[in-house]
Amino acid sequence: MPASKIPFQIDGQLRQYIESRYSPIARDDQEKFIEALVGLTELGGDRKQTMRSFFEQVTRLIFRFFAFNEIVMGLYDRKRKDWYVESVFGFRSEIAAEYKRLRYSREEMVGQDRFPYISIGRTSAFGPVEGLPESERKLFSRPYAAGVSRKDLDEFHEGDYIDVLMYDPHKNVVGWIELSAPRGGKLPSRMTVMWIEVIASVCASAVRYRWSLEDQSEG
Amino acid sequence: MEGQSIRPDLKRYVENFYSPLPKDDSEKMAVGLIDLAAVGADGRRSIKTFFEQVVRYVFRQFGFSEVAIGLKDRKEDVWKYEAAFGFTKDVEAKLFRARYDRADMYGQERFPNIKTGKLSELNVAEGLPVEDTEMYDRPYRFRAKRTSVEEFHQGDFMDFWMFDEKREIVGWIEVSSPKDKKQPSRATVRWIEFLASLCAQMVLLRWEEDQLRSKKASSPGPPVENADMPSG
């Protein structure tokens, strides 16, 4: 029997040490977050999941780890060639219904005229309430608070929002994550924005993967 | 009514607060992942180019001096290396010539290992077949005994699996020679597991899109409907 075929037993002490050191149960928030990210990529590649159920998982992850109380996720509609809201979290039912009725044109999605914004990352932007058209107030959870002037520059004011866009390689927007009402009422940390951009990248690939599957099944 | 303009002091404050250059290692890691995801999802860049960026990222971010990435052949049960970093030219050439079958990839006999996570395992040098000790730039000598369980011994390596939804191995990231010669931290192992799962997502996306393109090429139909989407 060649040497390479002789069954080999790993040293018991080494095995015990390694198994204990890398025990699979997450020990802290960082490990729980990584575990959730891995779960998200797996879910993104699971053809049995609907887009909505995938987005709901994304929403839960963001709510759990990044302390935003209001989260909206939207998608590009390939037939109508506009953008719509696919999932809404943290709003009263009548506001959620308003969101579900919305449709955004290309100009609204990527232009600055109707929704002025400040870039805060590679794929994310901060939209201050002062720049929003009056018509958007129907989407505020506390419209009375939106009229109160901003006290501090680091305050996340009622009506402020952050959009994290999902892009395809041609810089087309395939979807977006919209965040508001952070617990603590302040602008989120730089790391928070960066991690949500990582999540948006995972989402962008998951969206394209589903589109590809849909196209194949439609022949 | 259109939106109003943004207060200049607020704009200045926010732009300064979120300035794009990463400020510490955690930010570098996150930005690196965003960049990798962009390359991975871009079918105009080859999978080899994507993997070459991933091996460099693992080297920079997690302190392994040797990193390789392998991929399954889509047509048959053969797995082979696509990218390598930190090896001598000779060893690199041997790596690229190596081919693994299903028994090598899934069995315990040829590469005895200890699970280190849902997607990873430590392959110990003592169990490696002799021919593989030559191949990996890590010639293991039985005289060089492991002095401590914490030591990442010459010849040890870790594999991080890329799975599809049926738990088939589509590829793997292989790391060895950590700069501090110790077993990596739990966080390092978990982050590379995420990276492997991200790579799996990109590989599967590319495979699906390639298949769709081939299908469309063989049966000409109307153009893809999102061709007039905006550039953001």
Image: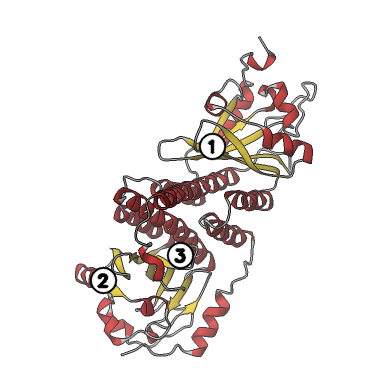
Q: Residue furthest left?
A: A94
Amino acid carrying label 2: it is Tyr
Q: Quadrant of residue A18?
A: top right
Above or below, B168 relative to A178:
above
Above or below, B85 relative to B34:
above
Position of residue A159 measured from the top left corner of the image (x, y, whole percent): 35, 79
Contact, mark 2 vs mark 1 (Cβ under 8 Å): no
Q: CA distance from mark 2 to mark 1?
A: 45 Å
Q: Of marks 2 and 3, which one's residue comes earlier in the chain?
A: 2
Q: Secondary structure at mark 3?
A: strand
Chain ID at mark 2 = A
Using the rendered image, report if marks 2 and 1 lie on a common chain. Answer: no
Position of residue B178 measured from the top left corner of the image (x, y, whole percent): 71, 42
Position of residue B214 measured from the top left corner of the image (x, y, whole percent): 44, 49
Q: Secondary structure at mark 2?
A: helix
Chain ID at mark 1 = B
Position of residue A105 measured from the top left corner of the image (x, y, whole percent): 33, 76
Residue named by callout 1: B73
Amino acid carrying label 3: it is Tyr
Badge nearest the viewer, 2 or 3: 3
Q: Quadrant of residue B179?
A: top right
Residue at horizontal 60 percent and vertical 46 percent from the top: B188
Residue at horizontal 47 percent and vertical 51 percent from the top: A33
Amino acid carrying label 1: it is Asp
Q: Rate crowding at label 2 as few (under 14), some (14 to 19) or many (20 or more) other CA atoms within 10 Å.
A: many
Question: Tag on residue A99?
Answer: 2
Residue named by callout 3: A167
Left or right placement of residue A21 versus residue B145 in this view: left
Tell me if I can see residue A65 in this picture: no
